[in-house]
Image (cartoon, coloured by chain):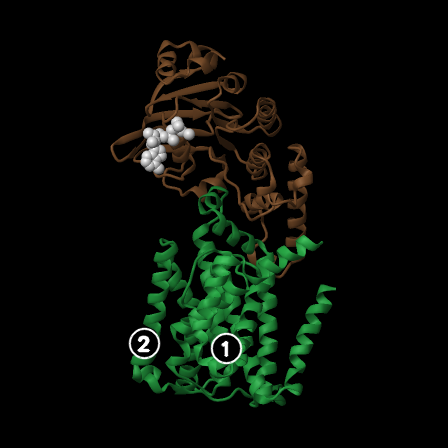
Amino acid sequence: MKKLAILLVVALVAAAPFVVGGYETNVLMNALLYVILATGLNLVAGYCGQFSFAQGAFYGIGAYTTAILSRDLGTGFWFNFPVGIAVAGLFGLLLGIPALRLKGHFLAIVTIAFQTIVYLTLSQWTSFTGGQTGLPVPSIGPVSLFGTTLFEITSLRSYFWFTLVIAVILLFAVWRLLQSRIGREWIAIRDDETLASAVGLDTTRGKLTAFVGSAALAGAAGVITAHAMRGVTPDDFTIWISATVVAMMIVGGKGTFIGPIIGAVLLTSMPEFLGGFAEYKMFLFGVLLVITVTLLPEGLIGRVRRLRERFS
Amino acid sequence: MTSVPVLEAKNLTRRFGGVVAVNDVSLRVGRSEIVGLIGPNGSGKSTMVNLITGELPADGGRLIFDGADISSQPSYRRARLGMARSFQMLRLFLSLSVEENLLLAHHIRMKSSMFDTIIARRSAVEEENSVRKRARELLAWFDLEEFADNPVSALSIGQQRMVELARGLISEPKLFVLDEPAAGLSPPNVDRLITLIHRMRDEFGMSILLVEHDMRVVRDLCDHVVVLDSGVMIAKGIPEMVVKDPVVVEAYIGSGWKRRAKA
Ligand SMILES: Nc1ncnc2c1ncn2[C@@H]1O[C@H](COP(=O)(O)OP(=O)(O)O)[C@@H](O)[C@H]1O
Ligand SMILES: [Mg+2]
């Protein structure tokens, strides 16, 4: 039943480009990327309880990894994709290490600092990153197996379908991760770190795994977006991206699997309905965030669950 | 069985600023022994527990657990070596179910790797199922089976105390350190607790270090008692003798404990 519903939703999303125009397809594609980003942040912040404001930085690290690799080594997407994930994961580990000693606001400040350092590096180290003008990235192009071309990823539609496939695979992996021992351990660390250690859990390892997993997902989204956009600029990976991802996770409902997905779709599509007011979207996200935090501490999904319990 | 004690604490010391909360205290817990740690409020019992289980670093002294020096091991390592504990201020994972609280404490005994559980390898699934079965059995032992899927926050204090004990048991510890397990329990529940602790020792062969306020519990359960006052060990021996020791009685009177000592 549940499987059928999920299949149906995925099929509907996949069929969307046949119904809507190119602009809307682009919005949907963005929504998919944000679903990956918000789901990633949710691992470290929602499940493990370690707040991070750096998801945009890891997104950028993934994107720039593939841009620099294709510039310097001429390698294509299939090589760059795992490398981009790994490099972002490595930086996740790097941020995780100081984070081990910090909590709450102090941790948030360190992640903001990290985000800022990454942005400054991308925009100022011109010889390596191309500076403010960024770098061009080739399209993914033809995908072939044993010498025969299966399909080509060049058009917007093909990118959208490709991203959908990747997103479904990543979400499935995350779901399995959360059902496994490690998911339970992350919740334990969030609930009570002292107790988690007392029952024998290596909380250092648990937190670092969450940081790495979270960053790796952002890295995956980054590699895809770099190819889809045919290029990267530092302004695609600012702290505003991080703030948007945080808002998505919280509005949807952190610490639940489905919450950040709903939050990402909602906040990506919302500005499209605002017409001329779309440029105030960050303001709107801020207001939504404040409303959620004060009125719906468990996010939209938490409220929906409460209502469902009451009526059943 | 060998005569190597499960736990040997040697000259443990811990200061908080100017306060010496634990001052050069030594104690040993033999195999399948129940050792009591008593003393007035603020005498350093919980601090002693935290030094033993590793929640607090010691300023001096050594800890030998099962023949090995564990003085520099962090608390999660001590747990893996076979130490379990309960907390004076009850601690459970509040957003998890009763069963999940137990499962977490058994993670350290599980053999399948993280990767095995993610790809749901057959052996990992079987192990998880057998651990769940074990958790249910233990919960049945504590009359909590029907609450397995409830969030722990839905239970009464008395039931939560029992979940804490079950959590310790499922990790199959060599030493179970209990910090005032009777606190907040009604008299009939205290009786149940005494029976359960007896059974834990007799049926699981466990060694227990029991911090307790309630003299009745101490007299019913403990083979040996160590008495602390202001961080210093002032007496030790079998419960009957220790309660009569004038130094101990003096410490009790000083803190209004005579009533309880006689009760
Ligand atoms: N974390 C701490 N920081 C400062 N002082 C503490 C701390 N924990 C305990 N103490 C002090 O150490 C002494 C012993 O406390 P405790 O071990 O809790 O005693 P007991 O468990 O016997 O009631 C008390 O004076 C207490 O105030
Ligand atoms: Mg105490």
Q: Residue placed at 57% from the left, 53% from the top?
A: A181
B6, B99: nearer the viewer = B99
User: Viewed as shown, does residue B227 lie left or right of B142?
Assistant: left
In the picture, one chain is green; tell me its letter. A
- Residue B53: mark: none
Q: Is residue A14 above or below residue A36?
A: below
Q: Residues within 10 Å of mark 2 (few under 14, many from 20)?
A: some
**Residue A116: x %, y % from top left:** 33, 71
User: Viewed as shown, does residue A246 lie left or right of A124?
Assistant: right
Q: Amino acid at mark 2?
A: Thr
A297, A139: nearer the viewer = A297
The secondary structure type at the circle numbered 2 is helix
**Residue B250: x %, y % from top left:** 35, 12
Quadrant where ligand 2 appears: top left
Q: Residue placed at 36% from the left, 57% from the top?
A: A105
Q: Is residue A194 above or below residue B125?
A: above
Q: Which residue is mark 2?
A: A121
Q: Residue placed at 35% from the left, 39% from the top?
A: B57
For the residues marked 1 and 2, what is the alpha-carbon distance in whole angstroms? Answer: 22 Å
Q: Residues within 10 Å of mark 1 (few under 14, many from 20)?
A: many
User: Viewed as shown, does residue A102 lie left or right of B174?
Assistant: left
Q: Amino acid at mark 1?
A: Phe
The secondary structure type at the circle numbered 1 is helix
Chain designation of label 2: A
**Colour given to chain B in the rendered image:** brown
Q: Which residue is mark 1?
A: A81
Q: Are marks 1 and 2 in contact (CB under 8 Å)?
A: no
Chain designation of label 1: A
**Residue A40: x %, y % from top left:** 50, 66
